[in-house]
Image (cartoon, helix red, strand yellow):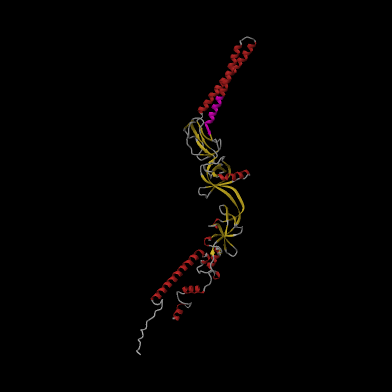
């Protein structure tokens, strides 16, 4: 039998072997790498907003007492009971009670000026004098006319009495008696006129002495000795402004009228404070006086007035000031410093620290505020400890510490053998152990 030739052996390749298998393996590894990278990004994105401030080491050793995470250093304050005044803020203008421009009542030449610029004067104080000689002459002339007419009147009355006697004896006619009676009456009228003239002359003579019509402060002088002044002048001798006491006029919202009227109707006195433009200096303390008689419909406000003693002249006429009107007082309100209030999407809240030094976020309802504190309507009780500084690094449930405790922790760091060894190595100049250079050479 002839031998049947066998076919040459062929190399059988498995599916997926060779270059194709290596390509699929590289794709799988790339996919796993991308997936691991994305997972790391997702973990980092979750960690950053949820990380606690306590994860940050507050000491250079990175660990707190006992080897746990460090706490956040914060400042605390206690919620207290206090009286909170309810105030209305407004802008006002200082307005004097009276302003008088002193004009001469008679014309003439000034002979004396007795006041000084800026001087405080009282009503009736002598300010200046006008040459009195013309007015004295007019008074003397009026007195002379009066005396003349009085003498003529007396003579006419004597004649009338004689004529009456002759008429009874029918020695003269009735016409003569009537004529003499008319003469007497005419002279009586002349005497009355003369007396009025005397009074006018005396008044003009008194006007030659210019006196202060009101109490107040004298302004800048506009005339000097020797000037001729007239009653028709527009400037006047001086201007006097009443500054003690003094008023402040300001505007308030129309919706505050009812509250103010109720308080005034109950007999309450509303304290009023005025401050300077920067709101840092108190210029005066006074009381609310009254409201205007109508509301301005164009602005929705009403004018109000307060009065101040102004004994130290701290308020100046036409000065712009900030006004604080105390309408009411909330007694025994729970108050905290303004720095303790934080604002979030859900409203106001504070961090309350318990006895375990753990901060808890607590929603609160904020009420009226004073210069130093804010009242809390709901959410807190007197005695609760709240965070005033460092709250931006806290989350709900974080552990906190006081600044004194943090300082003590920094001065007394926890013992660490590796850190001690490193410090000892630096003190020895880089040589090993405490044997110094000799010990290092021995090791070699």
Q: Which residues are magenta?
A: 196-210
Is residue 42 visible in this depiction of the protein?
Answer: yes
Looking at the image, how many numbered discs can be counted on the residues?
A: 0
Q: Is residue 236 magenta?
A: no
Would you place residue 443 above or below residue 195 in this image? Answer: below
Q: Residue at x 52, y 27 (%)?
A: 136
Residue at 57 percent across and 19 percent down: it is 187
Name the spot of residue 159 as percent of width and height, x first: 60, 15
Q: Nearer the viewer, residue 334 or 14?
A: 14
| In the image, farthest residue toward the right | 168
Front in this rendered view, residue 132 or 432: 432
Residue projecting furthest to the bottom:
1
User: 7 or 299, which lies in front?
Assistant: 7
Task: Specify the principal SS of the magenta part.
Answer: helix
Q: Nearer the viewer, residue 304 or 365?
A: 365
Give the residue at x 60% y 12%. 175
Q: Residue 295 at what x, y percent from top left? A: 55, 41
Residue 36 at x, y percent in the picture: 46, 70
In screen coordinates, is 35 left or right of 334?
left
Quadrant occupied by the C terminus:
bottom left
Q: Is residue 249 visible?
A: no
**Magenta stretch containing residue 201, yes or no?**
yes
Residue 205 percent across, percent down from the top left: 53, 29
- Dividing the picture into quarters, in which one does residue 157 lie? top right
């Amino acid at each position: 039998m002839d031998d049947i030739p066998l076919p040459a052996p062929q190399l059988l390749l498995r599916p997926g072997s060779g270059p194709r298998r290596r390509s699929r393996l590289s794709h799988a590894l790339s996919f796993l790498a991308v997936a691991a990278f994305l997972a790391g990004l997702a973990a980092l994105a979750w960690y950053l907003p949820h990380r606690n401030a306590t994860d940050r080491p507050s000491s250079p050793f990175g660990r707190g007492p006992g080897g746990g995470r460090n706490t956040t250093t914060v400042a605390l304050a206690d919620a207290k009971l206090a009286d909170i005044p309810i105030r209305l803020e407004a802008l006002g203008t200082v307005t004097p009670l009276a302003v008088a421009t002193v004009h001469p009542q008679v014309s003439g030449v000034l002979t004396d000026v007795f006041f000084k610029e800026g001087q405080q004067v009282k009503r009736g104080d002598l300010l200046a004098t006008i040459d009195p000689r013309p007015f004295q002459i007019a008074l003397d002339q009026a007195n002379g006319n009066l005396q003349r007419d009085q003498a003529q009147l007396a003579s006419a009355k004597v004649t009338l009495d004689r004529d009456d006697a002759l008429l009874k004896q029918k020695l003269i006619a009735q016409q003569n008696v009537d004529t003499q009676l008319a003469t007497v009456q005419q002279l009586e009228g002349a005497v009355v006129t003369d007396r009025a003239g005397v009074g006018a002359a005396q008044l003009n003579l008194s006007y030659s002495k210019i006196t202060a019509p009101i109490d107040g402060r004298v302004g800048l002088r506009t005339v000097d000795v020797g000037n001729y002044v007239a009653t028709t002048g527009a400037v006047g001798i001086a201007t006097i402004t009443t500054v003690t006491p003094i008023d402040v006029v300001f505007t308030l919202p129309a919706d505050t009228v009812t509250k103010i009227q109720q308080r005034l109707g109950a007999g309450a006195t509303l304290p009023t404070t005025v401050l300077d433009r920067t709101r840092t200096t108190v210029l005066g303390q006074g009381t609310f006086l009254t409201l205007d008689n109508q509301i301005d419909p164009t602005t929705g406000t009403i004018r109000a007035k307060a009065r101040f003693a102004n004994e130290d002249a701290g308020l100046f006429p036409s000065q712009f000031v900030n006004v604080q009107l105390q309408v009411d007082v909330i007694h025994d309100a729970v108050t905290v410093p303004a720095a303790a209030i934080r604002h979030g999407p859900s409203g106001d809240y504070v961090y309350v620290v318990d006895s375990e030094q753990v901060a808890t976020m607590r929603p609160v309802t904020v009420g009226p505020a004073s210069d130093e504190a804010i009242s809390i309507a709901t959410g807190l009780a007197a005695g609760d400890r709240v965070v005033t500084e460092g709250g931006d690094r806290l989350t709900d449930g974080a552990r906190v510490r006081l600044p004194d405790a943090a300082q003590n922790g920094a001065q007394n760091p926890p013992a660490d053998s590796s850190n001690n060894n490193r410090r000892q190595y630096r003190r020895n100049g880089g040589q090993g152990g405490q044997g110094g250079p000799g010990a290092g050479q021995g090791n070699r």
